[in-house]
Image (cartoon, rainbow, N blue to C red):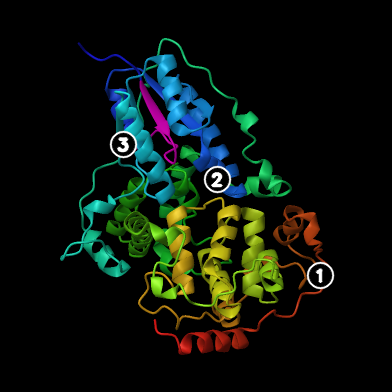
Amino acid sequence: MTDKSPIIMWFRRDLRLGDHPALTEACNSGRPVIPLFIHDDVVAGQGAAPRFRLGLSVASLRDALADKGAKLILRRGDALSVLRDVIKETGAGAVYWSRLYDPISKARDTAVKAGLKDDGIDAVSFRGHLLFEPWSVETQTGGFYKVYTPMWKSVRSRELPNTLPAPGKIPAPDSWPASDALDDWAMGADMRRGHDVVLPHCTVGETAASHRLGAFIANRVADYKAARDIPGIKGTSGLSENLTYGEISPLACWHAGWRALHDGKGDAEVFLKELVWREFAYHLAHHTPRITTGNWREDWDAFPWKTDERLAEVKAWKQGRTGIRFVDAAMRELQVTGTMHNRGRMIVASYLTKHLMCHWKIGLDWFEDQLIDWDPASNAMGWQWSAGSGPDATPYFRVFNPVTQLDKFDKNRDYAKAWLAEDYKNPSQTALAFYDAIPLRWNMAPDDAYPDPVVTAEDGRKAALAAYKDRDF
């Protein structure tokens, strides 16, 4: 007898309809499909900005499904318990989802799959969050890659499948189960004053993500290698925001990059390398989950970083008033837009971990709360790369000078002018927006005097190198 029981399509970080193997397989089965999003402990445990941005993506998916005649069911609670409830209410015989690879999601999904199988329910996971499954990429001697460049060389020429079109129709059940109201979840509440400031800077949903990719390939990828390092211009793709929530697939980005490369846009290869850098982070998180919570290189466990977040220098770093203009501009950009230019991320991370000698986990946690493009694997690897405790051949000699970096990458001070109000008689609107976004208790105003450096570039470098000198790494 042909199984006509519904399939629950459990959406998580795959909030799109196109190039969605799990959804495509469910729709092609001929069985009713019940889209479901669960606000579980994994969602609740996210920081203010990621949870706010996730709520926007869920709303966009809800509307996209409605256009197809389907309904996104929203439930709150333990994932396995919610799934069992919906299965009982609908008679569903299977649950499909896209695989995730960070330790918290993997632990949840493993428990869910085991529980459903014990109940006699088909629990099937599909690709979709990465280009290459972590277990499918190995060195010549076996095992996973611990250095990025050899991994890039290994995968760059691999054949990958074409992207899948969005389903033309999503088969509906005879009746829909009850759903929570998304507004009742108040996923943006913890943003407080920053909610209305950050919201206009969000590019939400599958359609917007596709347009963003198209505009980048058409207008900016040809100059990507140099432009991506200039924070005062729009030189990057901005797609990290959309990849984070699965509003666009990495496969769509990969094929677009290769088409651009074949069309003579040589800098597209740098874009492809960035996609594989994201893959590298997830492969490390899969194979060495400690990277998300502790030093990837365990010989750094005894390093005497400062760990007290109440320190004045940590407060100054978070509030963008270290007295180092590149650091402060980047930290203020974060408050206004929920994102930060990649060059800025490297500079603020280097300054915190090397000039201020503070533990990288302080920065990791701050970004996890503030970034709308927060990604568990990329965030962890990025911070450890900057701190020196991660997978990097030259862990501690890299101490960025934030003053000369500004001279090199922001010669005309376009970036500084965009985000620092104190230096200018007529501050930019973006610089002023910072004061609308921050907590009132910070007690900052545009007419404040710009602070002296907490630690100068030269003093910080000397202190860092002295701290590293006698340690056996």
Give the position of the C terminus as an image quadrant. Answer: bottom left
Is disc 3 in contact with disc 1, using a CB cutoff of under 8 Å? no
The label nearer to you, 1 versus 2, is: 2
Sooner in the amino-acid sequence: mark 3 or mark 1 = 3
The amino acid marked with disc number 3 is: Ser
Magenta stretch: give its range.
Answer: 7-19
Q: Image height check: is 15 above or below 103?
A: above
Q: Which residue is mark 2?
A: 45
Is disc 3 in contact with disc 2, using a CB cutoff of under 8 Å? no
Circle 3 packing at 10 Å, graded few (<14), some (14-19), many (20+), is some
Q: Which residue is mark 3?
A: 125
Q: Which residue is mark 1?
A: 425
Quadrant position of residue 106: top left
At 34% from the left and 62% from the top, the residue drawn is 273
The image shows residue 304 at horizontal and vertical percentages of: 54, 77
* Residue nearer the viewer, 406 or 61: 61
At 70% from the left and 76% from the top, the residue drawn is 323
Q: Main secondary structure of the magenta part?
A: loop
The amino acid marked with disc number 2 is: Gly
Q: Image height check: is 236 above or below 91?
A: below
In terms of secondary structure, where does tag 1 sit? loop
